[in-house]
Amino acid sequence: MQIIVISYFIYLVISLGLTIWVARTLHKRGAIFLVNAFHGNEELANSVNHLLVVGFYLVNIGFVSLALKTDLAIQDWRRAIEMLSDKLGWVLLILGGMHFFNLFVFSRIRNGNGTRRPPVAPNAILRVAPVSHP
Amino acid sequence: MKRLYLLYDERCGLCRRLKEWLLQHEAWLELVAMPAGSPQAAQMFPELKEIASSEDLVVVSDEGEVYLNNHAWIMCLYALREYRSWAYRLSHPLLMPFARQAFESLSRNRRLISRWLGSGNIETIANELRQVTLEPCSPTEGTISDYLQ
């Protein structure tokens, strides 16, 4: 088999493997954040988590596919490894960027969703909290 | 904190208008508005008459925390999805005295106050808010003796 085909194959295996690993980490660790952000509403948290991971897969696999092709003439293994390293470097940077973007989304959801403390202190506190709803 | 009770002066046109404006927006916290001094308010919050007069704007949380006037305006903004970040900006000590002016400006012309807050300079914002004139909380119906009762 030609060196270039083997290189492409290695590139795909490593890139997709990394994408799956990062997405699973996000899915697993992000779940706790989201359940907290949605006040324990696990169904909603799972749904949002799943949607975020789908978006993550789409962007990353899209990028991996687009970045596959090379116009370099690869005749020896040295060139092949350099090309692989170059492409994997980009994949890792994009994965890292997407990962931080997801963390940012998690923290935005968490901060914006009613969990931040009120900006001002109360002027007084009732001895008996209101109980009945009108 | 899940619900805020808003006790407003029903004789005040401005307060009524702002209450309507508040209730039109999507909120993080459930907002329940009732006229201050109404039998319902007196029944739910018997202790309030020692804390506030019927001319104060009062916000009470479902946990019993009472916020008056400027604090109450800020809590109203805090409750709204779109305006929570404004509540944090307005809680700056220099801007707090103008919470009501800011609220009035916000409900009339969002873009204007958005520009002030966007500028980031607290003193400039305070100066701008100082110039906002508020219509007085005057009774719009009934006689002055009704108002005094």
Image: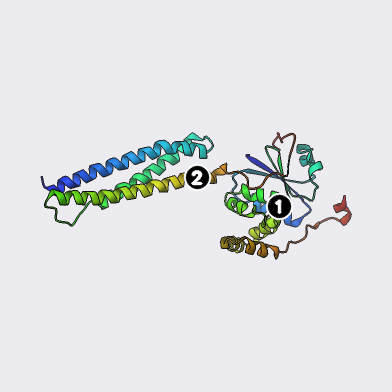
Residue with the most extreme front position: A78
- Helix, strand or loop at mark 1: helix
Residue A106 position within the rendered picture, expressed as x and y whole percent measured from the top left:
46, 44
The answer to which of B96 and B15 lies nearer the viewer is B96
Name the side, left or right, on which A16 lies relative to A49.
left
Q: Chain of mark 1?
A: B
Q: Which mark is residue B107?
A: none
The answer to which image quadrant residue B45 occupies is top right
Q: Residue at x 43, y 40 (%)?
A: A49
Name the side, left or right, on which B131 lies relative to A54.
right
Name the side, left or right, on which A89 lies relative to B58.
left
Q: Is residue A53 visible?
A: yes
Residue that numbered label 1 is attached to:
B70
Residues under labels 2 and 1: Cα distance? 28 Å
Count neighbours of disc 1 (C-alpha within 10 A) and say few if under 14, some if 14 to 19, many if 20 or more: many
Residue with the most extreme right position: B145
Residue A77 position within the rendered picture, expressed as x and y whole percent measured from the top left:
14, 48
Residue that numbered label 2 is attached to:
A109
Residue A108 position within the rendered picture, expressed as x and y whole percent measured from the top left:
49, 47
Q: Is residue B38 visible?
A: no
- Helix, strand or loop at mark 2: helix
Image quadrant occupied by the N terminus of chain B = top right
Residue B20 position within the rendered picture, expressed as x and y whole percent measured from the top left:
68, 52
Name the side, left or right, on which B144 lies relative to A14.
right
Q: Residue at x 20, y 51 (%)?
A: A82
Q: Chain of mark 2?
A: A
Q: Residue at x 73, y 54 (%)?
A: B15
Are callouts 2 and 1 both on one chain?
no
The amino acid pointed to by label 2 is Ile
